[in-house]
Image: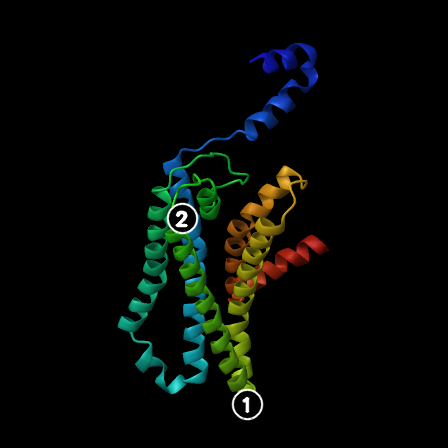
Amino acid sequence: MAYDRYLAICRPLHYHTLMTRRRLSQLEISYDWCLFQIFVLYSYASCELSILALMAYDRYLAICRPLHYHTLMTRRRLSQLVSFSWLTPFSILSISILLTSRLELCRFTIKRLFCVNWMIVQLACPNSNTLSNSIASYATILIYVSHGCFIVWTYMHLVRTCATSKESRVKFMQTCVPHLISLTTFVTVIFFDLMYIRFGSAEIPQSLQNFIAIEFLLFPPMMNPLIYGFKLTKIRNRILSIIYATTH
């Protein structure tokens, strides 16, 4: 209160700016909403990777095993795979959130625009048992690293198959390149975010820190409609006409 009065009287020209920065640096969220925020954000990232793995499998069957595609990719099998790509992340993250919710916290400040599960675990009191949280985290990492290995395996077969004929190369360019761009975009922003969490400097301006924190929520949803929409002739022609109009 005294600091507020000092700014208002002695530094009136800077009052609004300084007080805004102070309020922004002290944003609060309840523990329950923090856990819910973790669940939503982590579910989005996990489901995105699961769906990308499912799309890689679909392309593998379509190009490498075309005669068996309709036999293997039945309506029932497709429903099972889609359910797996959604239910698996929800189940894993529900367990992680439940394990985190039982921890007793001794600190309550997160230097992040949104809540992060391992940061919450680090706020736990020294006598808290976080072993189960660590096991759940490593299990989650193992599951999604296996997703990545599966995608690499499918593309090894795709590249080897498509190198044998011109028709297969054309099919690869039409179906696999958009998927590869989406996959690369998603993995890049996630990797960059993880590297910033691990090695980022506190001297970076707050606005840039916030942008880095939310980039994985911005770029993939913005890029995917353009990537897949560009395959459609009407959308592609419309985009090209807009680009041409703005550059001439």
Asked whether, in this view, residue 29 is left or right of residue 243, the answer is: left
Q: Residue at x 59, y 26 (%)?
A: 22
Count the labels in the image.
2
Is label 1 in a helix, a strand or a loop?
A: loop
Q: Percent position (x, y) of residue 9?
A: 66, 9
* Real-space CA distance between mark 1 and mark 2, rounded to the nearest whole angstrom: 52 Å
Quarter the C terminus occupies? bottom right
Q: Where is mark 1, residue-wise? A: 164
Q: Are marks 1 and 2 in contact (CB under 8 Å)?
A: no
The image quarter containing residue 50 is: bottom left
Q: Which mark is residue 130?
A: 2
Identify the coloring: rainbow
Q: Residue at x 26, y 71 (%)?
A: 76
Tell me if residue 222 comes above or below residue 236 in the rendering: above
Q: Percent position (x, y) of residue 108?
A: 47, 34
Kind of residue sitting beneath label 1: Thr
Asked whether, in this view, residue 86 is left or right of residue 229, the answer is: left
Q: Earlier in the sequence, mark 1 or mark 2?
A: 2
Q: Percent position (x, y) of residue 64?
A: 45, 84
Residue occupying the far front of the picture: 127
Is label 2 in a helix, a strand or a loop?
A: loop
